[in-house]
Amino acid sequence: MNPNWTYRVKNSTVVMIDIEATGPEYGRHSMTEIGVAAGTVAAGVTERFRGVLAPLSHVVESPSTCMKAMKTGVAEGRQPLLVMQELRAFWQSLGSPKSILAVAMPAAFDWPWLTWYSHRFLGENPFGFKCHCMSAEFAIRGLKFDHSTLTHDADDAAIQLAAYLKTYG
């Protein structure tokens, strides 16, 4: 493991992002949940955010996780603008942008949803332009993640963050 990267992880507030969506295309499908968990290697998971967003459309892909996302969004969803404003405030409360290390699993799916919604509803991206991929790092390091522990809702961010931080503890 790169000692510079280990130093970065151990000296950052690590922020895990996990989203649930009704399909893979932003704009056509909807992000209905966003879970964020923050913490440090020393303290573990210390902060959590959960936002449920009303769907932008009723287009749904067939996997059961997409159907569950739509049901949650319809039943509990709030206006995306309000949820994104709350998320921005939560994120800013975590410290300076340079002290935050954003991580997602996989980053290639979750991060674009976050940035698309932030530009659409906030008119800016207050979350930065980098997100580290836990999936890629675990594969490179030969680590396994037990996907059976996931609930396919916003709580997954805390589950993923705890597993990520443990590898550096």
Image (cartoon, rainbow, N blue to C red):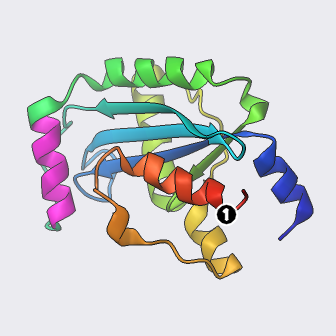
Q: Is residue 58 visible?
A: no
Q: Residue at x 66, y 69 (%)?
A: 137
> What x and y, as percent, mark residue 150?
34, 61
Closer to the camera, 131 or 7? 7
Q: Which residue is mark 1?
A: 167
Where does the image place residue 158, in percent across and percent down from the top left?
46, 46
Residue range in magenta is 64-74
The correct choice, above or below, for 146 with respect to 151 in the image is: below
Relative to 10, is 72 on the left or the right?
left
Q: Quadrant of residue 5?
A: bottom right
Task: Quadrant for residue 14, please give it.
Answer: top right
Decide if residue 59 is in sight here: yes
Q: What amino acid type should be assigned to the residue bearing mark 1?
A: Thr
What residue is rendered at 17% in x and 38% in y?
Answer: 73
Categorize mark 1 by other alpha carbons within 10 Å: few (<14), some (14-19), many (20+).
few
Horizontal and vertical percent position of residue 100: 70, 36
